[in-house]
Amino acid sequence: MVIKSGFCDLGFAKVDIDRQRRRGFQEVIYCPGKTKEQIKKIARELIKNRQNLLLTKLDKNVFTYLKKSFPKLHYNPVARLGCLLNRGRISPKGLVAVISAGTSDIPVAEEAVATLGAMGDRVVKFYDVGVAGVHRIMDNIDQIRKAKVIIVVAGMEGALASLVSGLVSSPVIAVPTSCGYGANFQGISALLTMLNSCSAGVTVVNIDNGFGAGYFASLINK
């Protein structure tokens, strides 16, 4: 390992230990494409530098492997997210609402919720309230309007983000998911709907990127 200014060079990875100071949260490990040994070495380096540990898209078998080295590591099987907190978290006054259109969208919504929890944000959840039964969102609209920022997770045609944005004054972060039948194109249809929203105040993250939505919502909330 070579220690550079602001990062540690492991050869296969350059671990950014300065990101907490710059961005308010440390580097996060995206697990797909990495071997379990690589993940463990990166995680060990972050922990050694007193960083919080967040691992996204973490396979259950890889978590079991890591747990032997990091006994305090926690796992959210729905969000497929591992977490080990070594530093205190900021607790902003603002509330973040996380909304899922359908039950099938919950894993992506839970990734956003778990990310927000690791970053110290207060979260309220509204699941399975999509446009196929719009009365469900209307039944919760007073609570949703109390949120400082709102995350809307939806697959299929992805219309829920525009609907919610038209009913609230808070910024909306739209998350398209890969849930849907063939013409959904693994989330492309929802992504295009959200990008083409006519409701001002909607920003869009990538398909199934609950982490990105949670991170951005936390920055707004703080």
Image (cartoon, rainbow, N blue to C red):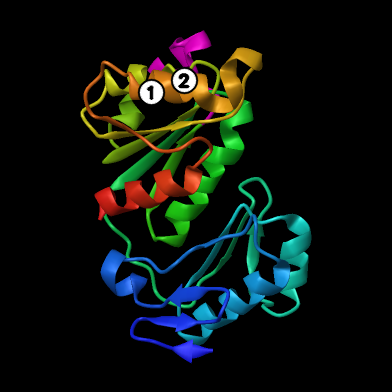
**Residues under numbered marks 1 and 2 in contact, where contact means CB atoms less than 8 Å apart:** yes
Q: Percent position (x, y) of residue 221?
A: 27, 50
Quarter-of-image position of residue 33 = bottom right
10 Å crowding of disc 2: few (<14), some (14-19), many (20+): many
Q: Which residue is mark 2?
A: 158
Q: Percent position (x, y) of residue 132?
A: 52, 9
Q: Which residue is mark 1?
A: 194
Please report the bounds of the magenta region as a residue range. 127-138
Q: Looking at the image, which is closer to me, 212 or 2?
A: 2
10 Å crowding of disc 1: few (<14), some (14-19), many (20+): many
The residue located at (34%, 46%) in the rendering is 217
> Please, is residue 117 above or below residue 45 in the view?
above
Secondary structure of the residue carrying numbered label 1: helix
Q: Is residue 94 left or right of residue 109?
A: left
Q: Is residue 131 left or right of residue 145?
A: right
Quarter-of-image position of residue 1 = bottom right
> Please, is residue 29 above or below residue 219 in the view?
below
The amino acid type, in three-letter code, at marker 2 is Gly
The residue located at (45%, 11%) in the rendering is 134
Numbered mark located on residue 85 in the image: none
| The C terminus lies in quadrant | bottom left
- Looking at marks 1 and 2 on the same chain, the residue that comes earlier in the sequence is marked by 2
Say if residue 208 shows up in the picture. Answer: yes
- Magenta-colored stretch includes residue 155: no
CA–CA distance in space, label 1 to label 2: 6 Å
